[in-house]
Image (cartoon, grey):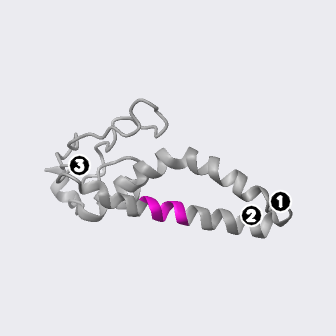
């Protein structure tokens, strides 16, 4: 098995240490009842997903970066492709950001943890 990829783990709800265990309980960010429920430990390697109280406050900055990046890209697309409809930019961006909130929330938490957890080498995983 290959070394776990942090980008893969962030995008596909996997443990940043082993790349196999699920980070959130549900696969979908749009499960209204459990979109924010995380596993406490990785089911495969036992990595602690909540290393200390308040750990995920830093994920707020990551989430903010996702929002800013999305809005800049969305604005550039509007300016370059839909200049005559620029009035609709503000009307359309707010509902889109509300819809993307659960996705950005989950991605920010996985990104924040991935910054602090070192992947285990593939030879250690097989033993």
Q: Position of residue 60 (x, y in %)?
A: 38, 58
The residue at 20%/43% (across/down) is 41
Q: Which residue is mark 3?
A: 49
Mark 3 and mark 1: Cα distance apart in space = 44 Å
Where 77 sits versus 17, above or below?
below
What secondary structure predominates along the stretch shown in magenta? helix
Mark 1 Cα-neighbour bin, 10 Å: few <14, some 14–19, many ≥20 = few
Write down the region rendered in magenta: 63-68
Where 61 sits versus 109, above or below?
below
Q: Position of residue 49 (x, y in %)?
A: 23, 49
Mark 3 Cα-neighbour bin, 10 Å: few <14, some 14–19, many ≥20 = many
Q: Is residue 102 visible?
A: yes
The reply to whether dot 1 and dot 2 touch (C-beta < 8 Å) is yes
The residue at 39%/63% (across/down) is 61
- Is residue 66 inside the magenta stretch? yes
Q: Is residue 2 visible?
A: no
**Total numbered labels:** 3
Mark 2 and mark 3: Cα distance apart in space = 39 Å
Q: Secondary structure at mark 2?
A: helix
- Furthest residue toward top: 33
* Sequence-first disc among 3 and 1: 3
Q: Which residue is mark 2?
A: 78
Q: Which residue is mark 1?
A: 85
Q: Secondary structure at mark 3?
A: loop
- In front: mark 2 or mark 3? 2
* Sequence-first disc among 2 and 3: 3
In front of the other: 123 or 49: 49
* Sequence-first disc among 1 and 2: 2
The reply to whether dot 3 and dot 1 touch (C-beta < 8 Å) is no
The residue at 18%/58% (across/down) is 123
Q: Secondary structure at mark 1?
A: helix
């Amino acid at each position: 098995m290959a070394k776990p990829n942090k980008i893969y783990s962030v995008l596909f709800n996997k443990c940043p240490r082993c790349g196999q265990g699920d980070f959130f309980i549900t696969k979908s960010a749009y499960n209204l009842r459990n979109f924010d429920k995380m596993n406490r430990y990785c089911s495969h390697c036992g990595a602690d997903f909540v290393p200390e109280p308040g750990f995920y406050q830093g994920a707020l900055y990551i989430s903010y970066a996702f929002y800013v990046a999305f809005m800049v890209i969305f604005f550039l697309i509007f300016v370059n492709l839909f200049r005559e409809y620029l009035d609709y930019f503000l009307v359309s961006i707010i509902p889109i950001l509300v819809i993307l909130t659960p996705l950005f929330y989950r991605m920010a938490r996985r990104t924040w943890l991935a910054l602090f957890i070192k992947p285990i080498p593939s030879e250690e995983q097989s033993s």
